[in-house]
Image (spheres, rainbow, N blue to C red):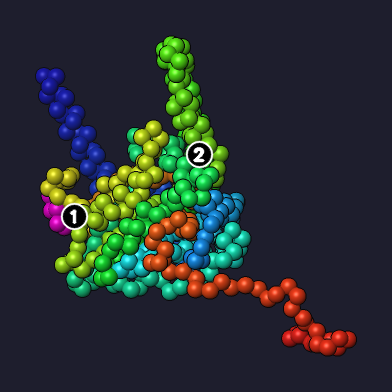
Amino acid sequence: MYMVEILQVIQYVQTATFNLMFHYWWLFLFIGLIFATPALWLSYAQAYYKKNNVYILIELHVPREVKRSPRAMEQVFTAIYGVKNNWANFEEKWWQGEVPLWFSCEVVSFGGEIHFYMHIPKKHRNMVEAALYSHYPDIEITEAEDYITRLPPTMRELDARGYNIFGNELILDRTKGSAFPIRTYEDFEEQVEEKQLDPVADILETLVKIKPQEHLWVQIIIRPLVDASLVAWKKEGDETIKEMKEKVGRRPVQTAFGEMVMIDRSPGELEIMKAVDRKFERPAFQTIIRYLYISPKELFNSNFGQRGVFTAFNQYMSQSLNEFKHNVKAWTRSSFWYWPYFFPQRRSFARKEHIYVNYRGRRMYGETTTSALFDIKFFHFGFAARTWGQMVLNTTELATIYHIPTFAVLTGPLVRRVEARKVGPPAGLAIYGKEGEEKKLPGMK
């Protein structure tokens, strides 16, 4: 009897729910639009703000002999952080759609010929160039045509021309997070000049190894941490350091003289704490490292594409600190052994399409409020790639992986360099004619 009554109640609820949805669907749609409209409008305003900020590509022509350490590039990144922007009031957020602007530092190889580029907001060009010239006086900077136009704009056209690609993004070890730093240029420096190492050498050697018909592109997209993201970053640092301090346990350690002493922490643990603390002392950027290996199908080497750049970046690995890993949610590999297990070829092509579009657009995750909708049209379910792809590097780490190569780099002849040094006029250059006779310069009356 009770069972019958329960079934009648369930049936009544189902009928009432159906009638409510059928007759008042417009009400639920209206309520949904009320909640969705602010986010949609904000995304529109942000997209409009992005469109109105023109970006340009500048090429950095390397001097023939650079003796400045990566510390000089760290000062350039510090200057870039100084122009960080974000909305400050209601109008800037909801009407102007202001969002933090980002920069892209790129090193690419066209058949073994290496070029250094920076993709920057045009309105910040003078500031970026001033920072570069102040720390690299002999460098030459020119505005360049975007090299991505060398290849078709879509993956389908690229495939039709007989090319294949391997693409991926690098992330920090997810078990440690962004709080733990990688090895930086400070670990590569030596007091003796002959023993100095350039941490960018391995990457350049990898770029040199490709065949004349191949392309290897690497971009490091950075956006200064501001407001809420900066607060969250500092909170992560405080929690990490607090957790490390709480792991105190006295243990016996043998000294160099054979004596046993009780200590709270080993010297290695103290060094780790200092390294983590130093990471949070410097300005930090949300960072994406993305690369593409593009080759004719008959020359395509998937092993080189998968391991070449990854191996070069792993020179910054530290077992006690951090290291770069593959973002397997973003890479172009796919098979029956990976979720969701079906249509591996179709999923692989969708992944290639996704990362190819992302690279060409210098796209950063979270550009606008609803930018996650961009991933819906791609079959590989790009939401996980967005989550995994978030990492934070500070100015020291960025200067380690991207800087003007020094004289220690062996790939010098294959790096496009400045052929002649440009200097200003001599300090004693006369601007007058004969003694007592004034020589008029252009613009003088």
Q: Residue visible at 40% across and 67% down?
A: 413
Across and down, in percent, residue 410 comes to: 40, 59
> Would you place residue 8 above or below residue 331 in this image?
above
Q: Which residue is mark 2?
A: 279
Mark 1 closeness class: few <14, some 14–19, many ≥20 residues within 10 Å: many
User: In this orientation, which residue lies closer to the viewer: 40 or 331?
Assistant: 331
Across and down, in percent, residue 85 comes to: 56, 54
Q: Earlier in the sequence, mark 2 or mark 1?
A: 2
Which three-letter amino acid code belongs to the residue tagged 1?
A: Arg
Q: Quadrant of the C terminus?
A: bottom right
Q: Are marks 2 and 1 in contact (CB under 8 Å)?
A: no
Across and down, in percent, residue 339 comes to: 18, 44
Residue 7 colored magenta? no
User: In this orientation, which residue lies closer to the viewer: 410 or 32?
Assistant: 410
Across and down, in percent, residue 81 comes to: 56, 52
> Would you place residue 368 above or below residue 417 in this image?
above
Dividing the picture into quarters, in which one does residue 41 lie? bottom left
Q: Which residue is mark 1?
A: 347
Q: Quadrant of the N terminus?
A: top left
- Region of the chain picked out in magenta, as a range: 342-348
Dividing the picture into quarters, in which one does residue 323 lie? top left
Q: Residue visible at 46% across and 73% down?
A: 144
Taking the image as drawn, is residue 46 in sight?
no
- Name the mark on residue 414: none
Taking the image as drawn, is residue 232 in sight?
yes
